Image: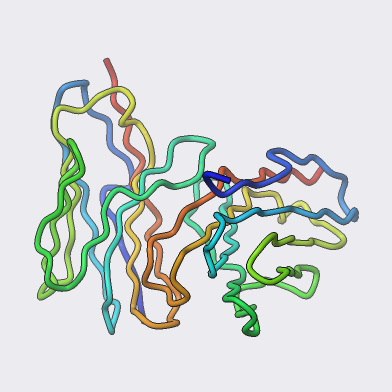
């Protein structure tokens, strides 16, 4: 596609449920990032994928969070047993270059509300 | 500790006026500095990327400056428009596989 695509755009769930968020990066982009943005706050790094290398998971806040990416395509971010504190916008970005020096192209985000 | 600090936290200006947003960083090493614009409810969009050797870069009415010696950057917006209302985020890349360092952003409101 022309840009980074994320789905769903909005998700309302009950505390304790699992959610899956999807990211379709720009074709040909080897790097993919997930960030979390709480209301009125800056972006928090969650996880980084680069090709077939082991992902950098150092930003995942707890073991309830996990993410997968198949090759250089779609990625899914899974949050298990959601808590109200997980309410945020989850942003995905992709980049042509593998190192953290290239321009990032962001999706529109998935807004998660945990009741 | 690598940090990026932006000021002011928020700003209100009248349409047609100019404004300047500040970004100070304590990131080392340094590869590049970016400014992003984030409209409410949207993902950030890149405005400029500057490397160590670049002092200024323009993108339409947006002009970014970089002083790598003092580790300061500014984003100047000329003849503001209502559509400039957004958050402006300063991001520094230390280079290589070191993670990007994000500022908290400046929230700009342009009023008619």
Please give the name of the residue rendered at 65% of the width and 49% of the height, measured from the top-left corner.
A88
Indicate the position of residue B69 as horizontal and vertical percent values. Answer: 10, 75
- Name the image colouring: rainbow
Most foreground residue, B40 or A21: A21
> Eyeballing the image, is A38 above or below A63?
above
Q: Quadrant of residue A61?
A: bottom right
Q: Position of residue B28 (x, y in %)?
A: 28, 83
Q: Residue at x 21, y 21 (%)?
A: B15
Give the left or right position of residue A37, taking residue B55 as reference: right
Q: Residue furthest top?
A: B112
Q: Position of residue B18 (x, y in %)?
A: 13, 33
Taking the spot 70% from the left edge, 62% from the top edge, the residue there is A75
Picture coordinates of residue A2, whole percent (x, y)? 52, 44
Give left or right: position of B48 versus A96. Answer: left
Viewer-proximal residue among A71 and B93: A71
The quadrant of the picture occupied by the C terminus of chain B is top left
Number of marks in picture: 0
* Quarter where residue B4 is shown: bottom left
* Relative vertical location of residue B88 with respect to residue B52 in this rendering, above or below: above
- Is B5 above or below relative to A90? below
| A6 left or right, relative to B18 | right
Which residue lies at the image location 68% right of the left edge and 39% below the top edge?
A: A9
Q: Quadrant of the N terminus of chain B?
A: bottom left
Q: Is residue B84 left or right of residue A35?
A: left
């Amino acid at each position: 596609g022309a840009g980074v695509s994320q789905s769903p755009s909005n998700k309302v769930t009950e505390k304790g449920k699992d959610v899956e968020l999807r990211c379709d990066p720009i074709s040909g982009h080897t790097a993919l990032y997930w960030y979390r943005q709480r209301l009125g706050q800056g972006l928090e790094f969650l996880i980084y994928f680069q090709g077939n290398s082991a992902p950098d998971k150092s930003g995942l806040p707890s073991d309830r969070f996990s993410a997968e990416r198949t090759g250089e395509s779609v990625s899914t971010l899974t949050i298990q047993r959601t808590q109200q504190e997980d309410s945020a916008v989850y942003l995905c970005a992709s980049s042509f270059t593998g190192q953290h020096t290239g321009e990032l192209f962001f999706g529109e985000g998935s807004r998660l509300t945990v009741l | 500790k690598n940090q990026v600090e932006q000021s002011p936290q928020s700003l209100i200006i009248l349409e047609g006026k100019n404004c300047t947003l500040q970004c100070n960083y304590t990131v080392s090493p340094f590869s590049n500095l970016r400014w992003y614009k984030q409209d409410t409810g949207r993902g950030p969009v890149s405005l400029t990327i500057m490397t160590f050797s670049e002092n200024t870069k323009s993108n339409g009415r947006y002009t970014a400056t970089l002083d790598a010696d003092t580790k300061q950057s500014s984003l100047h917006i000329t003849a503001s428009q209502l559509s400039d209302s957004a958050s402006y985020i300063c991001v520094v890349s230390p280079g290589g596989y070191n993670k990007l360092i994000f500022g908290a952003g400046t929230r700009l409101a342009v009023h008619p």
